[in-house]
Amino acid sequence: MGTRALWPAGRCRVRASPLDNMYRNTVRSWWEANAMPVETTYTSLRERLASFLDQVANDQEVVIVRRRGAKDVALIPAEELASLMETAHLLRSPRNAERLLAALGRATGRKGKPESVDKLRREVGLGASH
């Protein structure tokens, strides 16, 4: 079964910013760390549904289901979907995306000043941890 791009080139056009490479590198690193999705057919999925669902849930695998004459679908862990939806929501605003990616850059470059959990909790009004 051949491999094809999940997000065809040229589909999304966004304004370039200095943080684009940082975002692309972060996504590329995530994608490379996670193996390519498992691919199966609708017929094979039907025959081994429980096994595929266990693989998705227990191994955090993504399963692409190829369907003859219909659009392909993907099975992903529910928590992964929630994370992707939250990320899309947070990055929807270009200003917020730039702020978050800049913070990520500071964190990965270890340019921030370490703070204790208790101090951070006090700053946001949660009080000291026990």
Image (spheres, rainbow, N blue to C red):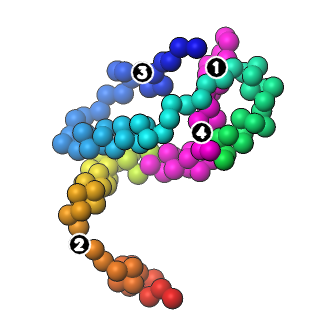
Q: CA distance from mark 4 to mark 2?
A: 36 Å
Residue beneath the point at 24% across and 62% down: 110
List the residue tagged with mark 2.
113
User: Disc 1 vs disc 3: which is toward the camera?
Assistant: 1
Q: Residue furthest right?
A: 47
Residue type at mark 2: give it.
Answer: Lys
**N-term-proximal mark, 3 vs 2:** 3
Q: CA distance from mark 3 to mark 2?
A: 40 Å
Which quadrant: the N terminus? top right
Task: Look at the image and give the residue range highlighted in magenta.
Answer: 59-87
List the residue tagged with mark 1.
66
Residue beneath the point at 44% across and 45% down: 88
112 relative position to 62: left or right: left
- Is residue 80 highlighted in magenta? yes
List the residue tagged with mark 3.
8
SS at mark 4 in the image? loop
| Tag of residue 61 | 4
User: Disc 3 vs disc 2: which is toward the camera?
Assistant: 2
**N-term-proximal mark, 3 vs 4:** 3
Residue type at mark 3: give it.
Answer: Pro
Q: How many marks?
A: 4
**N-term-proximal mark, 1 vs 2:** 1
Instruction: Give percent across and percent down for residue 25.
Output: 30, 40
Task: Please tell me how crowded label 1 is: few (under 14), some (14-19), or many (20+) other residues with Cα within 10 Å.
Answer: some
